[in-house]
Amino acid sequence: MKRVVPVLLIVMMILPYAGAVPILDASTKFLLEGKEYMETTQQLSLSLIALASSYPAVENLTISDIEYFVDALLARQNPDGGWGYYEGSVSNVVDTSYAVIALKKTLAVYEGNKRSLIYNAVERGVDFLVDSYNGKGWGYVPNTLTEFYPTLMAVWALGENGYSKDHPYIKSAIEYIEKTEPYGIRKGEAVALKLLAYHAVGYVSPGVREEAWKLVNSPDITTKERAFLTYALLVYDGLTFETAKLLTTLEDLKEKNESFVYWANKPGQLVQREVFVTSALATWSFAKVSGELAVEPETPFEASCSELEKVQNKDGGWPYIIGFSSTDRATYYALKALKKCYFMDESIGKGLEWVKGRIDKNMEIALSKGELYPPYVYNLLTLLEFNLVNESEKAEHIAFIKSLKKGDGKWGDFLGLQPYDTALAIKALLALGVSPQDEDIVKAKEWLLSFPTEGWGTVITTKYYTRFFPSEVSTTIEVLEALEPLVTKQDVEKHLNWLINQRTADGGWPNIKESYIVGVLMYQGQPSVELTIRATEVLYAFGIDYRQETLQWLLPKKKNNLWGSSIIDSALATLYFSTFEELPKPVNLYEVIRALPDGNFKILYTFGRDKVALSVKDSLNTLFGTNMTAEQFKEIGDGNYIVLADLTEFDLSKYNPYIEIKADKENVYLNGKSYKRDSTMMIVPGKTSKGYVLFVLYPRSLDNAVKVFFASNIVKYLNGVACVVTYEDKNQNGIVELEELEAEFMR
């Protein structure tokens, strides 16, 4: 059998390679095609780890494929619980460790009886390792002197099975490893194993990670060492620009066949090709990245976005309750939420047209009533949210709102002056750009702060008396939201405390927590999604944090991908989800990159960037097997686009409101973080209702840096909400090299 393997490899090397096959698919296929030629426990174990890690990322990889390797390992386990180098060989610590690690990592794939068989095999293997401990570490076989390689492997295997650095066996083994020079394996492999073993037991060794980086960038290591170190550094650092560079180097080292790829150790003195082990290690690295970049399951945010769009009424507005007529307030919150979802969308445009058709009529109603009419205010706030009110119109609205006062800095209804109406007026005036020092705003603030009550509610005001009804959460929130830009926490302390006290035992807020008559509980309010979210957010604005508790309270409130009992509940839930960093944003770089092969992207470029655009086009067509075209920018229409432009040439808020880019003469700022303007490229994903937009924003001085970046395989691994690339001509030769680019994946 050993003589067959070289023949197999010769055949593989003379066959052409189909570049369109994804590398993980192609490399797992190689391991499957070569399974009958694998003789050693290490080959089977590492191949099993690679395949189990790739499942289910590889479409054609099945449980049956994995089962071949599982059954092979189970069959060759010896009665003492260990494994030998070959089937039937005497059990040794190194091969037992590899088998234990492989089978342990495979448990996640299985359920039922098979899982029990694997679990029992792992337990017996762990027992063999524990019994083989010699008081200091491990030798190759039980009752032999301690040696570096088996001790390191045993620490890794036991760490994968719950042993920590504090266990006396592990502690003693680490002491031995730390003061012993590696032998029996090459230096790069030893350092990679150290990283993985120490990571498994929770031990941090100063300098090991740095040594790994030094070795992986050395030209003297073998391909096998490089693959091992790449995986270990991915475990420690995750997918960063630097680890992505390692993957591109590893990809460049692959050898090709018509339908699969593989890796072999580079030839040299005392270096064997070890195609199965090296290929398994490389595949393991790509599988890990594939797992990290895999599309997240649909989040609560995404689910509520799509459902909000579905429940829009035919007239363009949104109802308070599904199936009823559109309301101005529900439409305001729905549009505000969808702006966070889709950025530019047909449903948003339709909704805005509905609002535009409502505002004049609602102004007439306000005028006839002689009071601030809430539907008018929500129409106005909606149009202001989307920058659809010009300066002269703003002046008209300011004058109109002030004309509806019922006293200096006070607004109200037929019952008299009201804190709710006054709060709405403050919100509208501030949104229109009126100064917080404006006389009416100042007087409104002073009036609201003069209330003797804790919290605010409805008021009946006559020339003879003022009657304060019990405070309500809804009115109190409205007033606190309006006052938040105008006051300090101390100014509203008693009202904040009252609001906190209205929180129910389950963590939500009702409009009225409890109502008593003559000491008897007559009413107990039920929390609502709207009030709970708004209370949480306004308290947070004043430095009181219930956000995580409210998130946990909110998650079970889903009903058919909507939240609570109203459209406003769902819209506010959507807005709330959008504020959490741990919840994925509506668009990220990997999502766009993943769409490149089949997305029919068109490259658009602004003035003077035609040569760069052609270079990027050619590079991407080669990398992804596409047939993109490039043309000068006219517009972003329906479809998918890659846009090459200057750093500040586009208003990104239309395509991605989570990213803000600003610049001055010296610096450019992404979400407030500064970079040197003349040496920075920013890659930002965006979305329209019809497709994706990938913005590549850079100064003309970086033309060649853009070409080099997009010519590398590293483009495949772009991830995060944005990528910032900086260039420095480190060797001062005027030629841009990939090693001179540094990048940060923004999370």
Image (cartoon, rainbow, N blue to C red):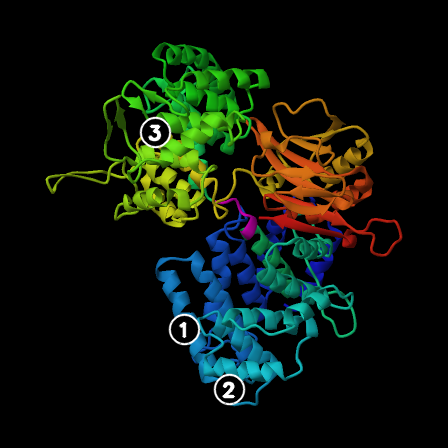
Marks 2 and 1, the one that precedes in the sequence: 1
Q: Give the quadrant of the N terminus.
A: bottom right
For badge 3, the amino acid type reads Pro
Decide whether the magenta segment is chiefly helix, strand or loop.
loop
Residue 142: which numbered mark, if any? 2
Q: CA distance from mark 2 to mark 3?
A: 82 Å
Q: Is residue 307 visible?
A: no
Q: Quadrant of residue 596?
A: top right
Find the magenta span and give its range.
292-296
Marks 2 and 3, the one that precedes in the sequence: 2
| Location of residue 399 with respect to 615 vertically, above or below | above
Q: Residues within 10 Å of mark 1 (few under 14, many from 20)?
A: some
Q: Which residue is mark 1?
A: 123
Q: Residue furthest front?
A: 464
Residue 474 left/right relative to 305: left
Q: Residue 507: x and y, percent?
A: 30, 47
Q: Residue 121: x and y, percent?
A: 42, 71
At numbered mark 3, what does the secondary structure look like: helix, strand or loop? Answer: helix
Q: Nearer the viewer, residue 292 or 500?
A: 500
| Location of residue 181 with respect to 685 vertically, above or below | below
Marks 1 and 3, the one that precedes in the sequence: 1
Residue at coordinates 43% horizontally, 61% vertically from top-left? Answer: 107
For badge 1, the amino acid type reads Glu
Q: How many marks?
A: 3
Q: Residue 125: x and y, percent?
A: 45, 75
Residue 419: which numbered mark, if any? 3
Residue at coordinates 82% horizontally, 56% vertically from top-left? Answer: 730
Q: Nearer the viewer, mark 2 or mark 3?
A: 3
